[in-house]
């Protein structure tokens, strides 16, 4: 069957032509905030990362879907993103692990996409103009433009509530006890934590006292989507936990911990989305190649009583902080990878050491 012609229209009126893939969106229109990701592989992990809730993912690498999809590579139960934009979608996957093609995967999950797009031009436009709302589908151009301009984007939206678990659950059987806040947690993170602890995953709205009543050795703050300022209840709970139990945060968890410490966050022009961001460790100067996915960052100098531990070498953005007096640290990037390099997996061992020190106070 011949593919249907489709368009992607950005809120500023920029138009990109392509063809429809995946599921058919209601009314022929799918909307979201358009961002780009630079990974060359790991597209399934990216699509199923809950941190992309509310966003349309543009893959800069031209050939996507080459090795199909496999259930083991899902980072969550389903995709939470709003759509996928690619240059060339592989029609026939080539891998012994593949259970389906990427196109079949999108259709099965009711996720729409557009292929054949000049993703180089789109990426350059987003890089210059910033991430912005967009709409794609088979509807006419005027309808798509109206939908793009009506899309609120991610700023000020509590997207965590749309991805967090409804009920607590437990994974792993490690010797320590960790409570993990689910702001959009990835399975790759849980696999790393499960090697050192028995992990109870709790909803994002869980009160601090309910966490302390579980008597954990440590608390983990997960990744998640959207604007940290839109989830003040999470920052408030973290503020009550700091100093009472060791804390480790990743991505949104990093931003929320910084907020709880009195810091502030801001939206990046087009975010960090990819698997090859160079990050320098302040102590020692070692450089790690990291996996990243976030649109917000912690404002430099805004977090009292904490030291910057990691810095992005591309643009100087804060990539990690550690409290001076409290047993707590966090990083903006993804040390678990999934997809991406494993340079920073040592941080899970750092968390284990923090939890096993006398009184968890770093002594």
Image (cartoon, helix red, strand yellow):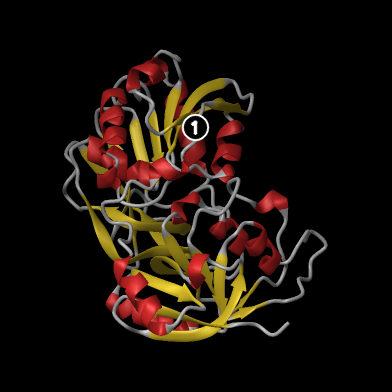
Quarter of the image with the N terminus in it: bottom right
| Residue at x 35%, y 25% (from the top left corner) | 362
- 142 horizontally vs 195: left or right: left
How many labels, in total?
Answer: 1
- 318 horizontally vs 124: left or right: left
| Label 1 packing within 10 angstroms: few (<14), some (14-19), many (20+) | few
Quarter of the image with the C terminus in it: top left
**Snapshot quadrant of residue 144:** bottom left
Q: Position of residue 120 (x, y in %)?
A: 46, 84
Looking at the image, which residue sits at the far right? Answer: 96
State the residue in front, 61 or 101.
101
State the residue in front, 344 or 36.
36
Q: Position of residue 277 (x, y in %)?
A: 43, 64
| Residue at x 32%, y 19% (from the top left corner) | 244
- Disc 1 target residue: 166
User: Does 304 sit above or below residue 60?
Assistant: above
**Snapshot quadrant of residue 203:** top left
| Mark 1: secondary structure | loop
State the residue in front, 154 or 266.
154
Q: Position of residue 284 (x, y in %)?
A: 37, 51
Query: In this orientation, does residue 235 appear?
Result: yes
| Residue at x 60%, y 59% (from the top left corner) | 110
Query: In this orientation, does residue 287 appear?
Result: no
| Residue at x 28%, y 33% (from the top left corner) | 233
User: Does 184 sit above or below residue 340?
Assistant: above
User: Does 136 sit above or below residue 338?
Assistant: below
State the residue in front, 183 or 353.
183
Q: Position of residue 15 (x, y in %)?
A: 40, 85
- 202 horizontally vs 238: left or right: right
């Amino acid at each position: 069957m011949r593919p249907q012609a489709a368009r992607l229209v950005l809120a500023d009126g920029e138009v990109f032509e392509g063809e429809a893939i995946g599921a058919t969106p209601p009314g022929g229109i799918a909307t979201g905030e358009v961002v780009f990701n630079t990974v060359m592989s790991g597209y399934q992990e990216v699509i199923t990362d809950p941190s992309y809730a509310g966003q349309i993912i543009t893959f800069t690498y031209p050939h996507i879907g080459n090795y199909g999809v496999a259930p083991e590579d899902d980072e969550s139960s389903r995709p939470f993103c709003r759509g996928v934009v690619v240059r060339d979608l592989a029609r026939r996957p080539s891998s012994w692990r593949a259970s389906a093609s990427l196109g079949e995967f999108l259709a099965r999950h009711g996720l729409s996409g557009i292929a054949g797009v000049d993703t180089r031009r789109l990426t350059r436009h987003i890089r210059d103009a910033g991430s912005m709302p967009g709409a794609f589908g088979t509807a006419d151009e005027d309808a798509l433009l109206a939908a793009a301009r009506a899309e609120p984007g991610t700023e000020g939206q509590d997207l965590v509530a749309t991805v967090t678990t409804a009920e607590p659950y437990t994974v792993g059987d490690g010797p320590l006890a960790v409570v993990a806040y689910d702001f959009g947690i990835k399975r790759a993170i849980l696999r790393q934590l499960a090697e050192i602890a028995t992990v109870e995953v709790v909803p994002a709205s869980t009160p601090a006292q309910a966490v302390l009543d579980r008597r954990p050795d440590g608390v983990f703050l997960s990744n998640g989507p959207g604007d940290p300022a839109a989830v003040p209840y999470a920052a408030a709970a973290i503020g009550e936990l700091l100093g009472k139990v060791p804390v480790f945060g990743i991505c949104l968890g990093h931003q929320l911990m910084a907020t709880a410490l009195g810091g502030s966050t801001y939206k990046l022009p087009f975010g960090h989305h990819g698997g090859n961001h160079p990050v320098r460790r302040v102590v020692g100067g070692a450089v790690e190649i990291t996996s990243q996915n976030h649109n917000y960052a912690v404002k430099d100098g805004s977090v009292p009583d904490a030291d910057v531990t990691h810095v992005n070498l591309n643009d100087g953005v804060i990539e990690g902080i550690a409290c001076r007096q409290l047993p707590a640290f966090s990083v903006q990037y993804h040390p678990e990878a999934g997809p991406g390099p494993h340079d920073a997996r040592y941080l899970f061992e750092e968390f284990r050491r923090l939890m096993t020190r006398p009184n968890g106070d770093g002594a």
